[in-house]
Image (cartoon, coloured by chain):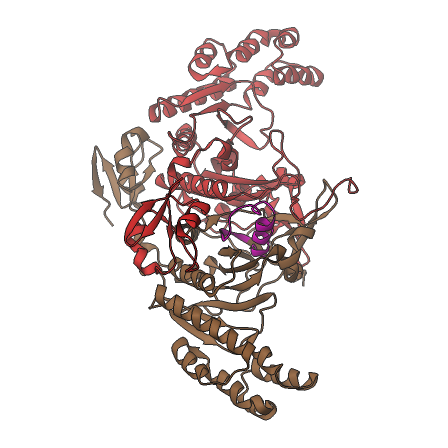
Chain colours: A red, B brown
Amino acid sequence: MIEDLEMSNALLPIGFCDLLPSDAEAEASLVQWIMSAFNDYGYERVSPPLLEFEQSLLANAGSGIAEQTFRVMDPETHYMMGLRPDITPQIARIAATRLINSPRPLRLSYAGPCILVSGAKHSAARQILQAGIELIGVDSPQADAEIITIIAAALAMEDVLPSISIDLMMPQLANTIIQTESFDEQQTKILMRALDRKDVAAVQKYGGGLSGILTTMLQAAGPADRAINMLKGLDLPQEAQQIFDRLLTVVEAVQAHNPDLQLTIDPVEFRGWNYHTGLCFSVYINGVSGEVGRGGRYLSDNGEPACGLTLRPDLLLPLINFDEHIRERVFVPFGHTIQELTSLRQDGYILIMGLTADEDAQAEACRLNCNYILQGKELQAVAE
Amino acid sequence: MIEDLEMSNALLPIGFCDLLPSDAEAEASLVQWIMSAFNDYGYERVSPPLLEFEQSLLANAGSGIAEQTFRVMDPETHYMMGLRPDITPQIARIAATRLINSPRPLRLSYAGPCILVSGAKHSAARQILQAGIELIGVDSPQADAEIITIIAAALAMEDVLPSISIDLMMPQLANTIIQTESFDEQQTKILMRALDRKDVAAVQKYGGGLSGILTTMLQAAGPADRAINMLKGLDLPQEAQQIFDRLLTVVEAVQAHNPDLQLTIDPVEFRGWNYHTGLCFSVYINGVSGEVGRGGRYLSDNGEPACGLTLRPDLLLPLINFDEHIRERVFVPFGHTIQELTSLRQDGYILIMGLTADEDAQAEACRLNCNYILQGKELQAVAE
């Protein structure tokens, strides 16, 4: 493998990249917009470090991320430190330690890069960007609905992004239903696999007395209103009914906050939700394969109830057209001082200072992609 | 060492920290302000990755940072990757590869975290934040002056930061002067050490025919106008005179751009400037020990002339009082929807949503540090 790889200084490891001018600016603006929306609803920013001791990084909610974590030894203590692959466990740690005495519900937000040992299904990226919120200390459908609503508000950028849809899942639901029948371990495994594969025929074959309920649940997957109508007709076991009723309350609350938000429900989805304890959400957007955000209800450190969602602003970058917001550039011929240019700068122009007296201002302005040249106190358009 | 360290999940490695709400927000705002000022003058943002192959990270301008670089093995290629301790060498790489065909002068900016193996003299921090600019492809005093002027503009935050001062150094000057006399290696070493220690007596004792010049240079260190007056009277060797003349041109150009900027000159300082080839700058600010930014003229990859400066916004954080800019918080009792609150949000209020119907709104508002409660469509001040 090494032999084939011609090393040059331009080569970056797979999954890492340089963001060049307009993309780097667009990403920073996007994060700024999202964080500002989070802040509008009282989610206060915290910023944990990129590296911390493996022992704390991978404790509790972090235990699932061990195999995605690069480690280095701390020369000070000889303990291993991990390079975070995910920020959420760090937020749980902060909530349970430094902010343990802050009033609940605790609303926190964060944004920053994470490093993965290997790329994920839909993306080879190993440096990813996360921006998210956590609502810690309260377990209620209103809290779940707040998270969904605020994520939708943060992504409501009409002129730059297509509208999003949020998929709601109850990873405990299928298992809760299946446990009401006395299937043996092997039957349970077959049935769960059939549900995971959305294999209606197999569900009908192996579902026993639950075939009808489980088939309807499979077929209900889709837009929230339709799914709810189909699920409402089912005679669910009591515990499953409670999970479903909670979903109903969340959907009603979200729709009250934001009637236009596209919600879908996937009643039998459970894969990939390991430490979550209630409703889970994935965020989708036209033009990006795979989810652009995910989250749900879980137990934070110290067993505090919590709900959160993490967006991946880096995945949105290809969709965003910031061209309309690009500022016009003015070539300022040599001899002007920055002090004279305050009003142009305040008017939003980008100022490109000429550095030598003998240059052809018109040619320089053109070469440096400027829209105008400053002539005396006037702006003169650059000939194309 | 390990025995004494009681591990708890709240413990972070020395030099790493959690930024809590108001600090994390202040740091993000500060970076946003600085980057926006850089952008005003055409410095376009690029964003290189946190990790890259050791071979490219430590090539050329990066060779000085090897011992501050943590490494991990890339499981894909089995090559070593380094966690960047500095962004400037990455910018040089980008300029010489992906942006090699972009018109010169190339004006680039960057901001992001870096990781050091061990803390520096004035700070134990091992995760540091850099924000800087590089002006690549031109070697002139006007280019040096532009860098200084724009750094000053980016830090001109009258209501939050004390004013800065910028110290100008010519690391080649002392050596250039000493080489005009036929000192042997030992004498040269003694004399350079005396200059480094600002030891006037030793300089007079060992300086031979240069004692007068070197003593005056030592004594000239201080405010730029005074220093220049003292240095102007010296009969410098030709090459040294050229270095000094260039300094004069830079100072004049900076003063034309910004007459109020505090400039100092340290004519004999050379320590710590290894790969720089011309004028160097340190940025100081009252209340922070050590420099808050540094940079100067160097050769970028491919031997392109370049000048740049890197700020450390994290060091400015203790100085900044963002309290005046904190937005007022409104407690919104349960039952309101986010849709109804658009105008309050647009007016700049932070909205804290009540999550249950049975709570005492007044008590909740007070407990959650809100300034107002929404009553119907009116804001009612919260009793202290």
Residue B252: percent from left, percent from top:
39, 70
- Of all residues shown, which one is farthest toward the right? A3
Residue A149: percent from left, percent from top:
39, 30
- B229, above or below A9, in the image: below
Seen from the viewer's position, the closer of residues B132 and A131 is: B132
- Residue B183 falls in which quadrant of the image? bottom right
Q: Is residue A265 left or right of residue B161?
A: right
Residue B89: percent from left, percent from top:
59, 55
- Residue A150 falls in which quadrant of the image? top left
Q: Is residue A206 left or right of residue B365?
A: right
Residue B123: percent from left, percent from top:
53, 65
Tell me, yes or no, if residue A25 can be seen here: yes
Seen from the viewer's position, the closer of residues B226 and B366 is: B226
Seen from the viewer's position, the closer of residues A5 and B159 is: A5
Start-end of magenta stretch = B86-113
Quadrant assignment for the N terminus of chain B: bottom right
Q: Is residue A119 left or right of residue A226?
A: right
Q: How many marks?
A: 0
As for residue B108 lying within the magenta part, the answer is yes
As for residue A335 lying within the magenta part, the answer is no
Tell me, yes or no, if residue A345 can be seen here: no
Seen from the viewer's position, the closer of residues A238 and A258 is: A258
The residue under the point 41% across, 56% down is A354
